[in-house]
């Protein structure tokens, strides 16, 4: 094989590298060597020529410089031949790696999780991977040149045709969802993605991928069904709730009406209780006045009459004098009891002197009866701004609270504070006594009359539209706090 033919073979085999400058140099060198071989005398002819020269005794001198150049050229050719052999070896390795890469690529192509289809512009299959063939349940060889449109169900072929036209016309990537009709009356939902491609083997073709979305579609259908079912349940529940809300609204309206009636009844009861209390106080006032004026006056007259009779008897009648003196003492005690009962029913100082002097008189009276207790008072209010009907309520609360503190608290000091705050009057009574458990005091298990005094204070405060609060702890004393509205303060 001549050198030129060798180089031409190398260049032909490796046509991808025809633009390489090194190979081009070797190619030109092969042409030159071919021309040199044409002009060179073959080596086997040297013997006959030498014999001929010897026979003819015509020996020609050979230019040593030319011979040296030939040897040098032959050595270079051997070097280039070695280089070419090394390059051929590299090319063989590259071809082997390329073949391996091609095999790997083919495996990835065939066993991809989606189906790959190469189509012409009319939708006919040019190539398909194994996944695509498995989707269609047909051997790959039988799919080539078949119309992919034939696998699409009739209702969606127009959509698929439009999809193919868009790929061929715009050259952009498009996608759509279609259903495939397979063997055994099976239907598969697939998502189709495609784009137009071009390469050396196929100048222009469509590359399409099929992704099985049947499970997704079934899940979406199930989700839609559940959504519809949930919507029906929500509508049903909403209707039930609407009925319930309507019933509750009616019940609320009824309760509001009942509450209004109850509030009105309470107000009427409070007004009635206030009138009853006022009538009771009026009756007590009248009774106290009758006792003080009539009974007290009669007793005083009897006393004066007996004292006058005592002066008329002689001193010698000692027995009669003693009887009269005892009778006068009894009458005097009865007069004191009469005054005490009258003051208890309705102290005359409340009408004659006012609320503050009456409270101070009552506190002094308690300290006289109970010298072991000290009462500290602080009163700051304008009596002219206090309703007349409210004065007796305040006094009765003070009377009841102070009596409870003196009788039951075992305290040595009681503090009474009465102040006026804008449109209300604030009363506070506290002691440093033994205290009590308020929970047990108002328990239903106790006797009916237990805590009657405290209940009376609360009742009087609430009848007047005020508030009542009591705080008490064992060995820590008791604090009673009452607030009463004062209508005259605004005037």
Image (cartoon, rainbow, N blue to C red):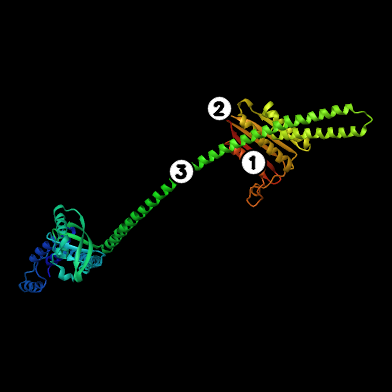
Report the residue marked by disc 3: 257
Considering the numbered disc 1 on the image, is that residue within a helix, a strand or a loop? helix
* x and y, in percent, of residue 30 in the image: 13, 63
In the figure, residue 271 lies in which quadrant? top right
Report the residue marked by disc 1: 456
Decide: is 383 above or below 46: above
In the rendered view, does 110 fall on the left or right side of 319?
A: left
* x and y, in percent, of residue 16 in the image: 17, 61
Q: Is residue 183 visible?
A: yes
Q: Residues within 10 Å of mark 2 (few under 14, many from 20)?
A: few
Considering the numbered disc 2 on the image, is that residue within a helix, a strand or a loop? loop
Q: Nearer the viewer, residue 424 or 278?
A: 278
Asked if marks 2 and 1 touch (Cβ < 8 Å), the reply is no
Decide: is 320 above or below 194: above
Q: Nearer the viewer, mark 2 or mark 3?
A: 3
Q: Nearer the viewer, mark 2 or mark 1?
A: 1
Q: Residues within 10 Å of mark 3 (few under 14, many from 20)?
A: few
Decide: is 122 above or below 250: below
Considering the numbered disc 3 on the image, is that residue within a helix, a strand or a loop? helix
The tally of labels here is 3
**Which residue, as the protein is rendered here, is positioned at the far right?**
316
- First reached walking from the N terminus: tag 1 or tag 3: 3
Report the residue marked by disc 2: 490
In the rendered view, does 109 fall on the left or right side of 303?
A: left
Q: Residue at point 64% right, 28% down?
A: 381
């Amino acid at each position: 094989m001549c050198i030129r033919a060798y180089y031409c073979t190398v260049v032909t085999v490796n046509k991808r590298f025809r633009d390489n400058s090194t190979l081009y140099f070797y190619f030109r060198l092969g042409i030159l060597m071919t021309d040199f071989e044409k002009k060179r005398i073959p080596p086997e002819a040297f013997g006959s020529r030498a014999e001929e020269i010897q026979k003819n005794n015509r020996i020609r001198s050979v230019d040593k410089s030319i011979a040296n150049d030939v040897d040098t050229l032959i050595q270079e050719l051997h070097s280039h031949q070695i280089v070419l052999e090394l390059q051929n070896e590299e090319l063989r390795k590259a071809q082997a790696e390329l073949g391996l890469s091609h095999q790997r690529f083919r495996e990835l192509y065939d066993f991809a999780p989606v189906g790959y289809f190469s189509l012409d512009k009319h939708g006919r299959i040019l190539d398909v991977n194994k996944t695509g063939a498995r989707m269609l349940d047909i051997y790959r060889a039988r799919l080539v040149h078949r119309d992919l449109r034939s696998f699409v169900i009739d209702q969606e072929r127009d959509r698929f045709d439009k999809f193919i036209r868009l790929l061929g016309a715009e050259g952009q990537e498009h996608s759509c969802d279609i259903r495939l009709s397979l063997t055994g009356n099976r239907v598969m939902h697939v998502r189709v993605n495609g784009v137009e491609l071009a390469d050396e083997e196929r100048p222009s073709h469509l590359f399409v991928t099929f992704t099985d979305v049947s499970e997704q579609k079934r899940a979406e259908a199930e989700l839609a069904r559940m959504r519809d079912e949930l919507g029906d349940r929500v509508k049903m529940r909403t209707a039930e709730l609407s009925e319930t809300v309507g019933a509750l609204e009616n019940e609320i309206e009824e309760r509001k009406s009942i509450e209004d009636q109850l509030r009105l009844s309470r107000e009427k009861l409070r007004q009635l209780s206030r009138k009853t209390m006022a009538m009771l106080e009026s009756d007590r006032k009248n009774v106290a006045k009758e006792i003080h004026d009539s009974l007290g006056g009669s007793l005083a007259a009897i006393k004066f009459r007996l004292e006058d009779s005592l002066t008329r008897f002689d001193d010698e009648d000692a027995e009669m004098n003693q009887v009269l003196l005892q009778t006068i003492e009894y009458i005097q005690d009865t007069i004191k009891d009469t005054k005490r009962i009258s003051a208890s029913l309705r102290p005359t100082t409340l009408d004659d002197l006012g609320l503050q002097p009456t409270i101070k008189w009552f506190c002094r009276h308690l300290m006289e009866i109970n010298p072991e207790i000290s009462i500290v008072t602080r009163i700051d209010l304008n009596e002219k701004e206090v309703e007349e009907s409210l004065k007796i309520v305040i006094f009765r609360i003070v009377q009841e609270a102070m009596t409870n503190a003196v009788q039951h608290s075992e305290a040595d000091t009681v503090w009474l504070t009465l102040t006026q705050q804008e449109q209300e009057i604030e009363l506070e009574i506290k002691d440093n006594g033994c205290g009590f458990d308020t929970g047990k005091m108002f328990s239903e298990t106790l006797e009916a009359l237990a805590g009657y005094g405290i209940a009376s204070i609360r009742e009087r405060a609430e009848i007047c539209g005020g508030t009542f609060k009591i705080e008490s702890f064992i060995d820590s004393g008791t604090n009673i706090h009452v607030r009463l509205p004062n209508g005259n303060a605004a005037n």
